Amino acid sequence: MDFFKFNSILSLFVLFGCLFGLCWTNDELGTDDTFTLSSFSYPRTTLRPFDLRYIRVDLPQWFSAVSIALNSDVDIDASTVERVPKSTLPIICFRDGSPPLPDALNTSLKDSAVSGIHGLDVEQCFPMQKNITMKLTNEQISPGVWYIGLFNGIGATTTQSKMIVRGPSYSFSANVSVEACTNSIMRGEFCNSTVHPLSCTASNAQNSSKATAGKPMMGSVMYCINNNEHLCVQEGLANLYSLDILNVAEELTITAENVRYQATPSNIAPSANDVNLMCFVRHGAMPSTSFYDYSSNLNKAPLVIRSPLIGRWYISILPVNLTKKFGETLESDSRACYSLKSQVLDCPFGKAGPNCTMESYILQTVLRSGPTPFESYYLPVGEVSSNSANFPLEPLLSNSSYNGEDIWTYFLLDIPRGAAGGNIHIRLSSDVKISYEVYARFGGLPSIDIWDYYYANKTRRSDQSMFFTLYDSSDDKVDFYIIYAREGTWGFGLKHLNTSTTTSKGQTVMSLSLERCPKRCSSHGSCKFSFDASGLTSYSFCSCDRDHGGFDCSIEIVTHQGHIRQSIFLIASNAAAILPAYWALRQKALAEWVLYTSSGIASGLYHACDVGTWCALNYNVLQFMDFWLSFMAVISTFVYLATIDEVYKRAIHTAVAILTALLAYTKATRSSNIVLVIVIGAFGLIVGCLIEISTKYRSLSFSIGFSLNFSSSWQTIKRWSCNLVKTLLRRFRWYFALAGFVALAMAATSWTLEKSDTYWFWHSVWHITIYMSSFFFLCSKVNPVNSENQLPTSGDYALTHQDSFPRSN
């Protein structure tokens, strides 16, 4: 019957997978025992500096293994990885349940992703490699949702808004395939381990006096037994079982009964009390003697698990040290036999904690209005109004203890599917000193010993990390976030302090909410959200301002004095445009004067807006005007050096305006633009020179004609070349031209040296040097004499006299 149920569920799973566009197949058999359940190919994607990508991998309960293959163009040697700055280091991370967030604490620079990825119960990060191929089985990782994160750089500066983004980029592609066992009760990498599901029946606590002895407040008991009443197993061989816990439970107890030996005739019959029947239990994954959550010798005492997590539990029963204990008196085929039983104790509705004596509340979700998905807050069902996210604690708190135990009050809430990129915000505020400790746990109820995150006081709390951020820990206020909370059921427990006080003079208000960005990015940035590769999970992140960084924009990267200094450099350096504008106006080159003046003004306005001082127009408009006019000013300087008619200059300026507008509109900040602008300017100068030559030196091709006398033609070309060199020497002041080339080289160098952290300095140098180079080039041009370039029509000439007065008819 279970087999047919499994096939029905699997069919539905395959159907929905196809509807979501995934490549679900059941005919691509890897072996006779496994088949490919899903396969996802991530196309080649480029990660620019400070970019990130997430890949979601869903692993159902019946998966056997997941294969991950990533290919990238990262070329970092393992011996030099520690010398690479963290802000540019490619990182790959793995995390169970929610998107990973790398930092210095969970990033290993010594291990590779393949060799160091053991024990994925916590997030692990490694340097990205050129090729990563791995296969993880259900004995290594648990089913559920797994996330792979790829990051181009880590650290506080990754979220800082930058005036320019430059740095190494890398591309990657990925393929993730999930395999499952063809038989529903088989597990292991090769589906060669049989897992017996325990058969469970529910019973009312009043009908289970034996199970609830000493626990009068229990609500219900779920009994689970193996279908085969007696099982026998040899030493070194384990029997495997599975048990599903669907709701928050108080206690899970595993016992072994009727323990005995099954052996061939022997002179000595060992007592059943001497059997070491080891039980290894693990949540979500197959247990072993090395990897397990709980263990006990069931022949000595039952295994009791307080507040077990929701989900599937795997149980391994293994007889150990039989031969060593009894020596050679036992035959090699002797077996330990037993009957396995378990029971799950549930509390009545509204009760939880030890012996079900504490109050428990289910929190309902109240969605916030707005464009951001999944933002909501939680309130006790039917207890308070939904008009506010805050609710008073005192009317809800447990008011008695049981046998002198601590007093707790529990709250349960649910994070919906796809919201794992959100953050749980917990706040407590009171008009007196807060007398509660807060404990949080995913998948079950927390306790003083079992928790994922907690806050007791200023000195006793969870370690500050990427996933636990404490903002306020004063006497009358507690404020902290659980970052990227896993989707599913969360349990929160409030432990009461000063329990001897029966009444409280103050009132404590609590709020639990699901928010996208912690502290609204600390008022130093904007909250944005995106989706993982599958589109099933939305995650949020902060885009901080120029002076702040970090996941919540709380880290000051640029001080106030540094901000003022950078602003002055970037804005005031545009005053260098006065020099070429003045010279162009003096030479009555009005078009160039307009360009230099407007370029300096546009650049100053753009950088005033970029640093956050003042925005005269829209930021994008100012950025376009700055780059476009700067490109035009550089190219116009080259065109100015050619002595051609204004009609030709207007034509060249029109063509250049179109080209530079395209450059400024598409990726204006790329480094290659400076090369393109200089090339376009040089090409404009060459075109102008060709036009000048074609108008002034037509005699070279027409007046001298074609002569069969080679020596005469060669002498003519030689004389023309000498005259051209003399003209160039007379046309330009070469000391100014040399200074212009030096300043232009300095400008190009400063452009290529611009990085995110030194942009303000090198770009200020760029302003000064590029305008200085234009000034020197303008000064280098000498106004030509009309007759300076006229070639003689022959080698002989004579002076003639002409009256300066007009002749009379």
Image (spheres, rainbow, N blue to C red):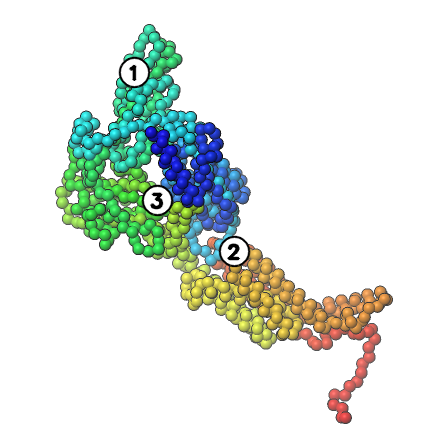
Please state, as top left, top right, bottom left or bottom right, where the C terminus lies in the image: bottom right
CB within 8 Å, label 2 to label 3: no
Mark 2 nearby-residue class (10 Å; few <14, some 14–19, many ≥20): many
Q: Along the polypeptide, which appears first: circle 2 or circle 3?
A: 3
Q: Position of residue 729 (x, y in %)?
A: 70, 68
Q: CA distance from mark 2 to mark 3?
A: 43 Å
Q: Position of residue 321 (x, y in %)?
A: 36, 17
Disc 3 is placed on an element classified as loop
Q: Position of residue 730 (x, y in %)?
A: 70, 71
Q: CA distance from mark 1 to mark 3?
A: 47 Å
CB within 8 Å, label 1 to label 2: no
Q: Identify which amino acid the numbered label 1 is placed on.
A: Arg
Q: Which mark is residue 260?
A: 1
Residue closest to the eye, 394 or 436? 394
Whether residue 444 is visible here, answered yes or no, is: yes
Mark 1 nearby-residue class (10 Å; few <14, some 14–19, many ≥20): some
- Residue at 43% x, 68% y is 616
Locate residue 327: give its quadrant: top left
Disc 2 is placed on an element classified as loop
Q: Along the polypeptide, which appears first: circle 1 or circle 2?
A: 1
- Residue at 84% x, 68% y is 707
- Residue at 15% x, 46% y is 504
Task: Count every numbered label the image shows and give the total.
Answer: 3
Residue closest to the eye, 405 or 648? 648
Disc 2 target residue: 754
Mark 3 nearby-residue class (10 Å; few <14, some 14–19, many ≥20): few
Please state, as top left, top right, bottom left or bottom right, where the N terminus lies in the image: top left
Disc 3 target residue: 417
| 46 versus 254 height, above or below | below
Q: Identify which amino acid the numbered label 2 is placed on.
A: Glu
| 152 versus 298 height, above or below | below
Q: CA distance from mark 1 to mark 2?
A: 78 Å
